[in-house]
Amino acid sequence: MNNREVMEERNEAKTLFGFWTYLMTDCVLFASLFATFAVLRHNTFGGPGGAELFNLPFVLAETLILLTSSFTCGLGMLYANRGFKNISLALFSVTFLLGASFLGLELHEFHKLAIEGNSWRRSGFLSAFFTLVGTHGAHISAGLIWMIVMITRVNLKGLTPRNLQRLKMLSMFWHFLDVVWIFIFSIVYLFGVI
């Protein structure tokens, strides 16, 4: 290995370490939001709780869409690592469409709750709910924007080592959001209905 290759390898390692550090700070953020929700979940101020508000089949459909997007993202990364640009782009495009569908369903749920008079201002429970689920939705939005950028970059410049590294970080971010959603589905919705 020459000096340039060693420096590139070190820079890639530093970038990945920095990205893992970012993901850990996001873990802390979501942990604090989950803790806040756990404290406030029974503070309904005489209003409805999760059992009255949540439509479990609707949320299950959201969950299946997001988990499917994680699967297509993983496949897209596998094909990208093997150099299959067009298949990878198609799979990341499907991932984008599934992620956008999930976000649309989440916004529909928020809109429906707000129209029924159950916005974040009604109670501590709803404030914690909207903050936790909304923060996840904001991360999904950021991931979708990142995905558009990467689909465009790979389409124009190909599967260069730099683009592969960026796709790897995007894939890690997307899978992280799916793990967070599984906790949201279990703690917020399932326990909320029980």
Image: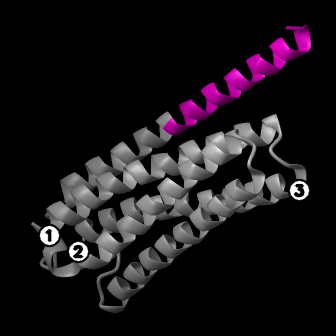
Q: Range of the magenta residues?
A: 1-23
Which mark is on residue 56? 2
In the rendered structure, which amino acid carries the disc numbered 3?
Leu
Secondary element at tag 3: helix
Q: Nearer the viewer, mark 1 or mark 3?
A: 3
Q: CA distance from mark 1 to mark 3?
A: 47 Å
Indicate which disc, 2 or 1, sits on the residue closer to the N terminus. 2
Secondary element at tag 1: helix
In the rendered structure, which amino acid carries the disc numbered 1?
Val
Give the answer, above or below, for where 99 lies relative to 156.
below
For disc 3, the marked residue is 156
Q: CA distance from mark 2 to mark 1?
A: 8 Å
Secondary element at tag 2: helix
Q: Per the image, is 21 magenta?
A: yes
Label 2 close to label 1 by CB (< 8 Å): yes
User: Looking at the image, which is closer to me, 37 or 83?
Assistant: 83
For disc 1, the marked residue is 193
Q: Is most of the magenta stretch helix, strand or loop?
A: helix
User: Looking at the image, which is closer to me, 157 or 128?
Assistant: 157
Inspect this view and state whether residue 45 appears: no
